[in-house]
């Protein structure tokens, strides 16, 4: 991998190592390499040997903040590596009173965006063996030769559309900031859908949602889905039937998205986790877009002190009903 | 594949579910009755403590089980029995209405109205209005559970 | 007898076969390849490797109503619902690993008494055309499970894809009957199909000999304490796994009538073992992760003599946190050291 990220990983290991081995934190949540160079998986580091495995490269996409919900039950103080989206996820959990701020040490990692294996493969046009990175470009090595592409072309979708690559909350910033990204078009696909007729939109969603396996990966990775009991599992009343009927698909997906109104931090983990590529972000973003338009700009997760729009009101609020 | 708007069968009558807040709109409905005002029997009223009690899943479940239109009626903003319930409802249901429209429901299918306990005439008018609009639009097939049937 | 059909004639073949009953093919919709009933204009991707979801849902549908009931206060009428006897499906283009996985499901659903009548009916009525793989992707590790990517022993017809034609080798009577119906489109093969050379997949350095037996002693192994940590408790791995077969039964009831259906369920969900009284014997992620991997690696082999994995690589590809069976085997001592 790129020399830069190796150096960065070294620096991260050194700093978090001091805290972990010095006893300031009992556990460090980071990443380690999986079976493949394009996969990094969560690392639960407790000692020096674990720290050896710690990695920081262009594939550390998994959000670690959510693991705090479980790990804080076992450990007094937990350290977490947070990218921009992970930090907003942490704020989400903080606002929902799911974590205690003073029991978490956040190591901020301004994030250049993570790379998408599928897009890399597509660009390579087959048999991708490895990649190397330098200065905003990625060199793809295949069985037949090499090809260079812009880094922006092979970013994960969620990273290409990211506005806040820098952590908005941290105890220590470990790398130099990337800066807020301007001019990101997040709502284009939502606007395109709004142009359709109701029947066309319904057909679109019916098609997309028909693939849903009801594996609930979108819910399980989501920082706003931290309820101890989800409506899906409630038995009485039983809101969510288990049949794969179109109506049941809509029930789950509309309610999941709706529960994120003013709370969704737009990290895109749901869409990344979906094994059948349902465009879940379009539902989330529709709500972000409308709530901003109706009740003023609000970016969930950016400021843990600001009131989420559905937890407050103004007497002269506008409404979206046909009677004004 | 899509069920969308179904053909109107002969003799079809829409089913409208009206969630009415206990303190204003339900009383408004009572007033409509005692004032001998008429509104279509297509409207089935379900009383809720406050428009702020509305769980969006009520609306979706109504569509699953055969509703052609859903209306939520609550106290006028500022007049909530619990002071602020309808202020919250206004924000929540506005976002929700936009979401169900985004999912492909026609705007007429889901509505919210503010009807006070002294507005028996408005209650009758609004219930007649939504019934007329849904009649013009036709039956709703979206989200409708095919397994759900009326008792044979 | 070897037959062949030009690739340009395939749509005509699909049309003919689908007239006989549902014809399931790897069809691409909005960028996702899954086995679906063929329809005119469908984008058939015989060239694709394993789709996201295995074809197990053809025999074990995600949801299947098997009983309807109706009644008043005194009587209850019950009606059995089952796939019609004429529901002769054709499964076309399934890869050898996936077909081996179906045979694993057969052992559970058919090869014991009483068998599962719904599954049996679908399975016995179906004709399976398997398709040889020529180049595995990096997620494939079927060699480890003695799957030959170029040959599926259980197929009714074995197919080989070349640049211009599809070679068809009938293996059973069912296969011959199927081809007889499409005689006008198919010709005798003039040459031998170019069989894929020996297809090598990765084996991740795993060594499975004796693993199932060793695991009997490792229920309380400390390895489990680390392995489950990253699990999110979603059901992706079980739903994309071709050898997972658990289902749940639920009623959909309304006034005086209703129906009972079964649908896929996943041992990774907390509710899977939730009992009516509130007790849950697998209360946490650790127990559930252990259950899933022990089922694949110990319980199934104990009963049926073979590890319940075919190396299709779907869990390696789809798990949102990259926790998969290879990692589990490695953690549980299945890594080759000096033995090999």
Image: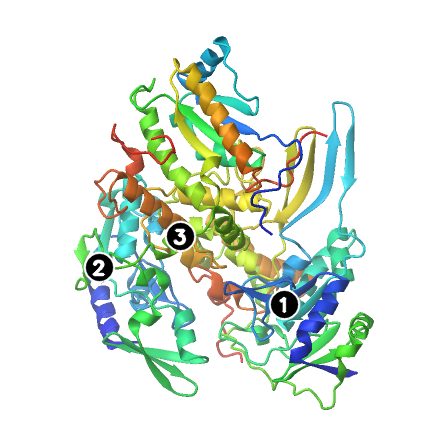
Q: Which residue is mark 2?
A: A182
- C329 relative to C231, above or below: below
Q: What secondary structure is marked by label 1? A: helix
Callout 2: residue from which chain? Answer: A
Q: Which residue in the protein does label 1 denote?
A: C98
Q: CA distance from mark 2 to mark 1?
A: 47 Å
Residue lying at 29% horizontally and 55% vertically, measured from the top left: A85
Residue lying farthest to the bottom in this orientation? C191
Q: Could you tell me which secondary element the residue under label 2 belongs to?
A: loop
Q: Quadrant of the N terminus of chain A?
A: bottom left
Instruction: Say whether disc 3 or disc 2 marks the residue closer to the N-terminus.
Output: 2
Against C324, residue A316 (above or below) is: above
Query: Where residue B50 appears, x then y in whole percent?
Result: 40, 22
Residue B109, position in %: x, y?
A: 48, 36
Mark 2 vs mark 1: same chain?
Answer: no
Crowding around mark 2 (Cα neighbors within 10 Å: few <14, some 14 to 19, many 20+) is few
The image quarter containing residue C39 is bottom right
Q: Is residue A283 left or right of residue C180?
A: left
Please name the residue that numbered disc 3 is placed on: A282
Task: Say above or below: A285 vs B50.
Answer: below
Q: Local crowd at mark 1 within 10 Å, few (<14), some, or many (≥20)?
A: many
Horizontal placement of A63 versus B151: left or right? Answer: left
Q: Tell me if I can see residue B136 in this picture.
A: yes
């Amino acid at each position: 991998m790129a020399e830069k990220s190796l150096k960065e990983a070294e620096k991260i290991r050194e700093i978090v190592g001091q805290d972990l081995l010095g006893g300031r934190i009992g556990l460090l949540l980071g990443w380690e390499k999986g079976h493949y160079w394009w996969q990094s998986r969560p690392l639960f580091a407790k000692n020096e040997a674990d720290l050896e495995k710690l990695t920081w490269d262009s594939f550390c996409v998994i959000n670690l903040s959510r693991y705090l919900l479980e790990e804080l039950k076992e450990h007094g103080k937990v350290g977490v590596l947070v990218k921009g989206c992970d930090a907003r996820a942490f704020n989400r959990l903080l606002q929902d009173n799911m974590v205690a701020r003073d029991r978490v040490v956040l190591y901020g990692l301004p994030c250049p965006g993570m790379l998408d294996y599928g897009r890399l493969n597509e660009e390579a046009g087959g048999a991708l063996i490895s990649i190397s990175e330098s200065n905003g470009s990625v060199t793809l090595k295949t069985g037949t030769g090499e090809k260079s592409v812009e880094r922006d072309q092979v970013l994960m979708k969620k990273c290409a559309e990211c506005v806040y690559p820098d952590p908005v909350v941290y105890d220590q910033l470990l790398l130099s900031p990337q800066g807020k990204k301007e001019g990101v078009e997040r709502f284009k696909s939502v606007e395109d859908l709004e142009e359709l007729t109701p029947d066309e939109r319904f057909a679109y969603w019916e098609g997309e949602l028909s693939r849903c396996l009801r594996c609930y990966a979108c819910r399980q990775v989501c920082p706003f889905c931290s309820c101890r009991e989800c409506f899906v599992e409630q038995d009485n009343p039983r809101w969510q039937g288990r049949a794969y009927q179109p109506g049941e698909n809509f029930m789950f997906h509309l309610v999941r998205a709706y529960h994120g109104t003013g709370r969704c931090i737009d990290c895109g983990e749901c869409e990344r986790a979906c094994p059948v590529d349902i465009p879940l972000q379009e539902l989330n973003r529709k709500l972000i877009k409308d709530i901003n338009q109706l009740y003023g700009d609000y970016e969930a997760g950016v400021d843990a002190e600001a009131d989420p729009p559905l937890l407050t009101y103004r007497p002269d609020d506008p409404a979206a009903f046909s009677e004004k | 594949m899509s069920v969308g708007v179904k053909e109107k069968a002969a003799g079809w009558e829409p089913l409208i579910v009206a969630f009415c807040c206990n303190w204003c709109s339900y009383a408004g409905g009572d007033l409509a009755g005692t004032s001998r005002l008429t509104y279509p029997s297509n409207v089935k009223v379900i009383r809720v403590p406050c428009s702020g009690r509305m769980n969006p899943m009520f609306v979706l479940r109504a569509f699953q089980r055969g509703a052609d239109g859903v209306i939520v009626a609550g106290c006028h903003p500022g007049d909530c029995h619990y002071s602020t319930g309808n202020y919250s409802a206004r924000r929540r249901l506005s976002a929700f209405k936009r979401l169900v429209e985004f999912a492909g429901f026609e705007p007429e299918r889901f509505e919210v109205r503010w009807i006070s306990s002294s507005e028996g005439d408005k209650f009758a008018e609004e219930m007649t209005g939504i019934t007329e609009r849904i009649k013009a639009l036709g039956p709703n097939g979206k989200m409708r559970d095919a397994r759900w049937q009326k008792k044979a | 007898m070897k037959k062949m059909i030009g690739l340009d004639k395939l749509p005509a073949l699909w049309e003919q076969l689908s007239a006989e009953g549902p014809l399931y093919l790897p069809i691409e919709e909005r960028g996702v390849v899954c086995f679906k009933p063929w329809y005119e204009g469908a984008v058939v991707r015989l060239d694709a490797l394993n789709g996201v979801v295995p074809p197990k849902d053809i025999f074990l549908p995600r949801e299947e109503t098997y009983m309807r009931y109706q009644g008043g206060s005194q009587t209850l009428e019950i009606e059995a619902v089952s796939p019609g006897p004429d529901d002769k499906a054709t499964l076309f283009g399934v890869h050898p690993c996936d077909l081996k996985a179906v045979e694993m499901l057969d052992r559970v659903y058919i090869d014991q008494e009483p068998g599962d009548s719904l599954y049996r009916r679908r399975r016995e009525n179906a004709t399976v055309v398997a398709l040889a793989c020529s180049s595995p992707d990096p997620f494939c590790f079927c060699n480890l499970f003695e799957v030959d990517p170029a040959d599926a022993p259980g197929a009714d017809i074995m197919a080989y894809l070349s640049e211009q034609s599809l070679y068809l080798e009938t293996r059973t009577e069912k296969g011959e009957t199927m081809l007889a119906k499409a005689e006008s489109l198919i010709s005798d093969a003039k040459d031998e199909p170019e069989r894929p050379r020996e297809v090598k997949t990765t084996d991740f350095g795993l060594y499975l000999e004796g693993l199932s037996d060793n695991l009997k002693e490792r229920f309380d192994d400390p390895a489990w304490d680390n392995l489950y940590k990253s699990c999110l408790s979603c059901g992706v791995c079980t739903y994309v796994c071709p050898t997972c077969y658990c289902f749940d039964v639920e009623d959909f009831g309304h006034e005086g009538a209703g129906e009972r259906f079964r649908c896929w369920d996943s041992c990774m969900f907390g509710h899977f073992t939730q009992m009516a009284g509130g007790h849950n014997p697998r209360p946490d992620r650790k127990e559930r992760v252990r259950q899933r991997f022990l089922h694949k690696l110990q319980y199934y082999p104990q009963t049926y003599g073979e590890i319940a994995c075919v190396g299709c690589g779907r869990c390696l590809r789809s798990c949102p946190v990259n926790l998969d069976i290879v990692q589990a085997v490695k953690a549980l001592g299945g890594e080759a050291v000096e033995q090999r």
